[in-house]
Image: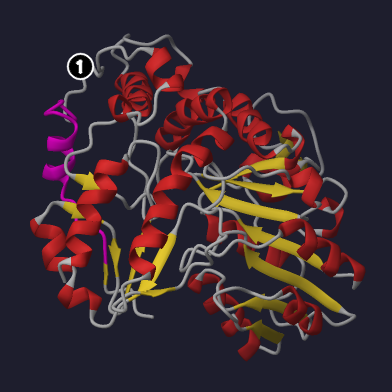
Amino acid sequence: MENKKEGNDWSRRDFVSMLGGASLAGCIPFAWPEMAKAEQEDSFPAKNMFAIKGTFVNAAYTHPMSLGSYQEIGKFLNTRMLNRQEPVGYDAFERSSVAADFARLINADKEEIAWIPSTMVGENLIVSGLGLSGSKEHVVTDALHFHGSLHLYGQLEKQGLKLTVVKPRNNRIDLNDLDAAITPGTKLVAISLVSATTGFQHDLKKVCELAHSRGALVYADIIQAAGAIPINVKDSQVDFCACSTYKWLMGDFGVGFLYVRKDVLPLIKRTLIGYRQIKSYTSHFLPFDPAGNSVFESSSTDDMSGHFEVGTFANEGIAAVRYSLDFLNRTGVDKVYQYRKPMIDRLQQELASDKRYIPLTPVDAVSPIVSFACKDAANLIKPKLDAADINISVYDDMIRISPSFYNDMGDIDRLLSVLKSV
């Protein structure tokens, strides 16, 4: 599958227009009218939380930013401008409390969470920390894992890694096929909890039980799951998982979370070193420095930040996800899922009976994604969607639809009308 056309190309001018003409250059003041919390939390579709133009059913591509997150970014920018609109020190954004909010969302301990710049960086940190680069260890993954991750393991295979890629059957990865692939001595099983391609969802607990019975560890990419479906890392016993925040967590690019189960953290070697890991540092070369035999002395912390955090953070993204995580924890991810499910079911029912669309998503899937194969979709469907101001992911021969809690059945009706007119 080639990523030819996915969503619409938004320019900076489009973004400014979407925000209602707010001054991004001056940012004085950077604010939106207050939104009623009762409407935010208790009423779906929550269209009042966003400034979306057109019909956007493409949250799996990148979730629209809420007005609340936009306001939080504005507060951060005020601190960067030193315009005294916000108290000094606001730019720290209480990173620890935001990480704790994410831990709460997936039922982890705060001490098991580290900040990372992206999902792929998180997976690379685990892969390199386990010593897989240049090794002959055995890794099992599946064809529905993120294509960037498959590229990672394919490149490591060229360096000597033993790689097994399980193929889907009937639009799903069969647990029996994983059972056959995970042989004794397997080092890592790497999967996407929810496939970005088809929306197939693994039973993470069963995958972990199987892998652990063979002595293997499990990494899960949860970028298409966190914030969209309930996740319980303690119940599943997954060893590692990671996600960026710009999809269902409704944050922004450049910031994400890495979870490592506390009892497996000692198995991970530090492969990237930076100032975020420093426990103590003393120099011995400046005036009034204490005497010492070396130019400097330093030590590392043994916690998650000491293993994985390296340098500066994308604080704008932290500001955005701070608001979103608070909303998701108060509202409940299960409520978001329950609201979205009838829209997914309707899409499945309406398009499955159309011979032009071949279902790729299992009918019992609970994920936020539904995909269909459609010959020459990029040429046949994309122009009609653009004309109707409807945004979904369109590939050469496939479409992917992903509604969120700002959508309603009217949006689904408009989309189906276009898809059935092809």
At 24% across and 50% down in the image, what residue appears? 413
Determine whether 223 is above or below 373 in the image.
Answer: above
Can residue 8 be seen? no
Q: List x then y, in percent, for residue 225.
A: 56, 50
Residue, disc 1: 28
* Quadrant of image for the N terminus: bottom left
Label 1 crowd (10 A; few <14 / some 14-19 / many >=20):
some
| Residue in the picture at 47% in, 33% down | 321
Farthest residue, direction left: 387
123 displayed left or right of 279: left
Q: Is mark 1 on a helix, strand or loop?
A: loop
Q: Bounds of the magenta span?
A: 6-24
Q: Is residue 342 visible?
A: yes
Question: Where is residue 40, by image quadrant?
Answer: top left
Instruction: Give coordinates of residue 197: x percent, y percent.
Output: 46, 68
Q: Is residue 85 above or below residue 353?
A: above
| Of 12 and 339, the residue lying toward us | 339
Q: Using the image, determine if residue 83 lies above or below residue 408.
A: above
Identify the residue shown where x is 46% and y is 25%.
323
Question: In x, y percent, where is residue 373?
Answer: 36, 76
Q: Pick the quarter of the image with the C terminus.
A: bottom left
Q: Which amino acid does label 1 sit on?
A: Ile
Residue 416 horizontal side relative to residue 39, left or right: left
